[in-house]
Amino acid sequence: MSQIKFGTDGWRAVISDDFTFANVRIVAQAIADYVRHKRSAAHRKNRIVIGYDTRFLSEDYAQTIASVLAANGIRVILADRPTPTPSVSYAIIDHGLTGGVMVTASHNPARYNGIKYKNSYGASAGPEIISEIEHYLHKNKVRQMPITEARSKGLVAVQDIIPQHLKFAIGYVDLPLIKKSGLKILVDSMHGAGDDCFAHVLAGGKTHLDMIRNNRETSFGGVSPEPKLQNLTELIRRTRKEGYDLGLATDGDADRLGLVGPDGKIVTGQKIMSILLLHMIEDRKMRGDVVQTICGTGLIDKICERYRLTMHETPVGFKYIADIMVAGDVLIGGEETGGIGFKKYIPERDGIMTGLLIMEMLAMRRKRLPEILRWVDKEYGTYEYRRMDIAYPSGLKKRLMDTLHKRPLRSVLGRKVVAIKAFDGHKFMCEDESWILFRLSGTEPILRIYAEASTEERALAMLAYGKKMALSV
């Protein structure tokens, strides 16, 4: 029996290895069983939206899921084209649906595909829901009907769900101000579902926008659709050489954003969230709690301290952030990878909205991005964040975690460890506010090492130290 295991954000596996049509049908049946047996007003409607990204066979997998849900008496809205994950989340709220399914492996390499389940709030399903879905795996025989029959019976309706999402996003920002700002922007969709979303929103006005990699390519040009330094060489080069104010990159399912300044320097997800927190507080005059993960930045702590905002810290995975956003008054919640959610929006990451808010901040302050970043460093101190992913043999995983638990680090490169956090991996916080985190990926066979320090040199040295230690266990 092939393994089906849900990780940080849904189930992901290698196509034609564990991610097969047979296993997709098994997962779809488990989702159907969960929806049919859930006792709540929201779930009595039994309506699900299904979206998919640009990966190999994603639309076929989406149709397969729709055919299984329809055979179980669940009505389906099926996206008519590759669609951003936040479009699926908004459709749930807009139509008052039971939940949603997104066929995507997000930022993983092209050989992967995956399935995310969204709850009735449009947020990533939390551990309780995922556990229930996993409980139903292999419990009941898969029911399926031909997709043509499902459509003819009115059980599956094919729709374009992107326009309503973009209309909502447009209403959230000061679009007229952005359009007349004269910003010159280069957008890299990384061959993913973001496609021409920014172009649609910014059509007309003085803002100039060009696009690269906005066509579908299931191999993603040979790189993972993750907006990080090594995958954005063309965006970085052109942004610097051709005088763009911003370079924006959306990941495979467009729920995360990569940001490049006019100097060609990539801005980490930590800094993106930090400057947008300041934008929400100072420019938009909004208040609320702040949520970040265990690999969040000390800069957020400093900002929250200055403005007397409550800061929550979660394990890695936006589902944990979303739970707090739904339950409380959260101004902004985000991850180090550039996935951010906002107050009075949807409790989910949205790379399109994140990009629009960056533009709005520049337009409102009438300042260029490097100037804003320099001001933040001056006001709050320098926080240089770096991450390293290394292939890590499965046999070493438990040994490393056991070692870090039994013999925790007492110092890192001459700096005393003053606090340890171990609710998701092992994070060692030093006396000079630098820190290093060892964490196993929830979706890939790799070890992630994170570090933050007051200089880039020390952050990189900490990563090298962490790698050497991990490989010598």
Image (cartoon, grey):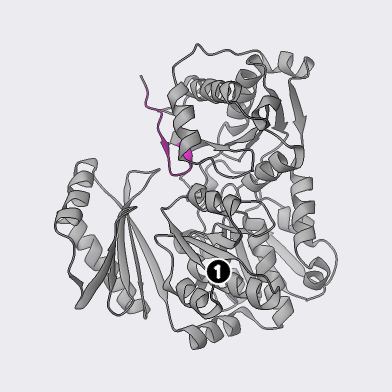
Judged from the image, the secondary structure of the residue bearing numbered disc 1 is helix
Q: Please give left or right for residue 433 compared with residue 139 in the image.
A: left
Q: Quadrant of residue 160?
A: top right
Q: Is residue 112 above or below residue 154?
A: below
Q: Please give left or right for residue 414 compared with residue 420 in the image.
A: left
Q: Is residue 342 above or below residue 300?
A: above
Magenta stretch?
2-11
Residue at the image point whose x is 60% and y is 50% from the top: 326
Q: Please give left or right for residue 298 compared with residue 418 in the image.
A: right
Query: In front here: 469 or 116?
Result: 116
Q: Looking at the image, can residue 427 be seen?
A: no
Residue at the image point whose x is 48% and y is 68% from the top: 270
Residue at the image point whose x is 74% and y is 45% from the top: 162
Q: In the rendering, at what x and y percent does residue 61 appear?
A: 58, 27
Query: In front here: 106 or 278?
Result: 278
Q: In the rendering, at what x and y percent does residue 151 appear?
A: 75, 19
Q: Quadrant of residue 331?
A: bottom right
Label 1: how many residues lie within 10 Å, few (<14), some (14-19) or many (20+)?
Answer: many
Quarter in which the C terminus is drawn: bottom left
Residue at the image point whose x is 42% and y is 73% from the top: 298
Q: Please give left or right for residue 17 compared with residue 91 in the image.
A: left
Residue that sits furthest to the bottom in the current view: 378
Magenta portion: prevailing SS class: loop
Query: In front here: 320 or 138?
Result: 320
In magenta stretch: residue 277 = no
| Residue at numbered disc 1 | 272
